[in-house]
Image: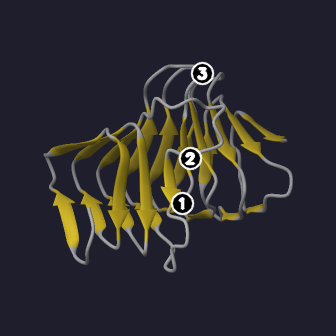
Amino acid sequence: MSGTGSTVIGAGASGRLWQRGATLHERALINEGTLSFRGRTVMSEGAKLENIGVFEANSEEDTESEAPDISAGTGSVVEPEIVNKGTIERTEFDRFRGTTIGVKVANEGAIKVLSREGSLTFLGGGSSSAGSEWAIPEESSKVRLKGSSYSMSGSKWVGAGTLLIQTGVTAEGVEAQTGSVELQ
């Protein structure tokens, strides 16, 4: 999708972003319902994914790959971002695959890894506001913060899973109530 304006998935509706090589250029994609994501998507020139509903981040790409599942386009002048006011969740089990988000994320809602041995990796930095939640209930599940700076002031980390913070990454305000925090 490209061009100014927005595309809205209304409350009660569902959408799928399953193709490899999808692009979101300049446009806002607003999810008020349920948006299922798999494959690879490139965001550029100020594109915004605003999630108010449920964003199912269940990419099936290889976790060992350095290419993010959602990435910023090369040479993009205006930085793309994901604004989460609803729930971003990884629900499918596959210990060899995870979802990697390579654009800035502003979390005002909940981010959850609900699958056993599931993972969500964030490369683009961002923020998590007071009252937001990061839930990793399964001990074998992980959230990774890599490659940039994150401001987590007032956000809550809950569950038995692991938060992995890459050495050299600034992650201010992380408050883990349970589970473990590891520096890599």
- Judging by the rendered image, the residue that carries numbered circle 2 is 68
Alpha-carbon neighbours of circle 1 within 10 Å: few (<14), some, or many (≥20)?
many
Q: Please report contact status of discs 2 and 1: CB closer than 8 Å, yes or no.
A: yes
| Residue shown at the point (47%, 66%) measured from the top left | 81
Which image quadrant is residue 48 in?
Answer: bottom left
Label 3 vs 1, first from the N-terminus: 3
**Mark number, residue 103:** 1
Helix, strand or loop for disc 1? loop
The relative height of residue 31 versus residue 151 in the rendered view (above or below) is above
The relative height of residue 137 versus residue 8 in the rendered view (above or below) is above
Residue 36 picture location, percent across and down: 31, 39
Helix, strand or loop for disc 2? loop
User: What is the three-letter code of the residue carrying label 3?
Assistant: Phe
| Residue shown at the point (35%, 68%) measured from the top left | 25
Alpha-carbon neighbours of circle 2 within 10 Å: few (<14), some, or many (≥20)?
many
* Left or right: 24 as drawn, with respect to 134: left
- Alpha carbon of mark 2 to alpha carbon of mark 3: how far? 15 Å
Alpha-carbon neighbours of circle 3 within 10 Å: few (<14), some, or many (≥20)?
few
| Residue shown at the point (66%, 31%) measured from the top left | 64
- Alpha carbon of mark 2 to alpha carbon of mark 1: how far? 9 Å
- Alpha carbon of mark 3 to alpha carbon of mark 1: how far? 22 Å
Which image quadrant is residue 103 in?
Answer: bottom right
Residue 6 picture location, percent across and down: 22, 70
The relative height of residue 65 versus residue 4 in the rendered view (above or below) is above
Residue 44 picture location, percent across and down: 44, 68
**Mark number, residue 96:** 3
Residue 73 picture location, percent across and down: 50, 64
* Left or right: 163 as drawn, with respect to 127: right
User: What is the three-letter code of the residue carrying label 2?
Assistant: Pro
Helix, strand or loop for disc 3? loop
